[in-house]
Amino acid sequence: MKVLVTGGGGFLGQAICRLLRARGDAVLSVARNRYPALDALGVEQQRVDLAELDPLLAAARGCEAIIHVAAKPGAWGRYADYHAANVTGTDHVIAACRRHGIPRLVYTSTPSVVHAGGDLEGVDESVPYPAHFRAHYPATKAIAEQRVLTANDATLSTVALRPHLIWGPGDNHLLPRIVDRARAGRLRFVGSVRKKIDVVYVDNAAQAHLDALDRVAPGAVCAGRAYFISNGEPVYADDMINAMLRACGLPPETRRVPYGLAFAIGAVLEGIYTVFRIEAEPPMTRFVAEQLATAHWYDISAARRDLGYAPRVSVAEGLQRLAAWWGTMVR
């Protein structure tokens, strides 16, 4: 089968492309840049901005399925930029499916589409979208997820996955932020009470996308539904971060700041960055403070049942792989 992967050059996108190629699928990645790692995998690449419809329509011709991973992440920036990347881009992916009769669409969402600011402990997919969002990323991802699920019908089968805190070797987003802050002495845990979170090793997250791709079809139980994806091993946030620091040869962090203080600092910094039109992301925002101070772990039994998803790499094994990879990177 020929599968189009949007954002195939990213951390998760590359892992998905690797698994697809390993089982013999032809893969086309569309992204804004070209990636040598994808060339090495034998992945066809086209440079496409998903905010532009015509180039995507041209690229999608002849494809039999789309895995839509590309998105604008982060906790800061202009709403228009997030909407163009996450909503308009998704609308264009759906349009490409319609134009070319592509029957299967797997969408990479995020659990933050249901985060209302409080603890989420063992919740399943019945938890509703919140009325308000603290950041443009979850707001626009929620809109896009709903459009993907609404698009499900007799000719286009869709499914949305919500992987939580993807990590592992090759991570160019979460791990560098943690390591940089630790080395600079600016890493702190937020809140006086330790909270559990879910994480998902990158290969498990990628496999979930292939599981969904293989199961989604007209009338399938997963069609038109969203699923939480994790390792199924809730861990205390500070334990996980310190384990990642240890894998990178750094000492553990123990310092904490009260949630109220972190939230207030985030509010002040948001105001300053807005007034002075600073484009860089503030070191703290209200959304980030809430994320760091609350529990968020999920019931993944629906993904196990409907998609056949089963995490293959445990957190412990993933940390061993991370340490081995980091050793090759720093030498």
Image: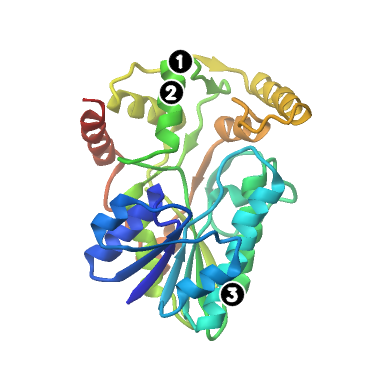
| Residue bearing the label numbered 3 | 95
Q: Position of residue 45 (x, y in %)?
A: 37, 62
Amino acid type at image mark 1: Ala
User: Are circles 2 and 1 on residues that touch, CB within 8 Å?
Assistant: yes
| Residue depicted at x 67% and y 46% | 136
- Classify residue 264 by image quadrant: top right
Q: Position of residue 204 (x, y in %)?
A: 33, 53
Residue 168 higher or lower than 140, as above or below: above
User: Are circles 3 and 1 on residues that touch, CB within 8 Å?
Assistant: no
Q: Which residue is at the front of the view, 51 or 147?
A: 51
Q: Position of residue 241 (x, y in %)?
A: 40, 28
Task: Give the CA separation, mark 2 to mark 1.
Answer: 6 Å
Chain-order first, disc 2 or disc 3: 3
Q: Secondary structure at mark 2?
A: helix
Q: Secondary structure at mark 1?
A: loop
Q: Secondary structure at mark 3?
A: helix
| Residue bearing the label numbered 1 | 184
Q: Neighbour class for label 3 at 10 Å: few (<14), some, many (≥20)? A: some
- Classify residue 63 by image quadrant: bottom left
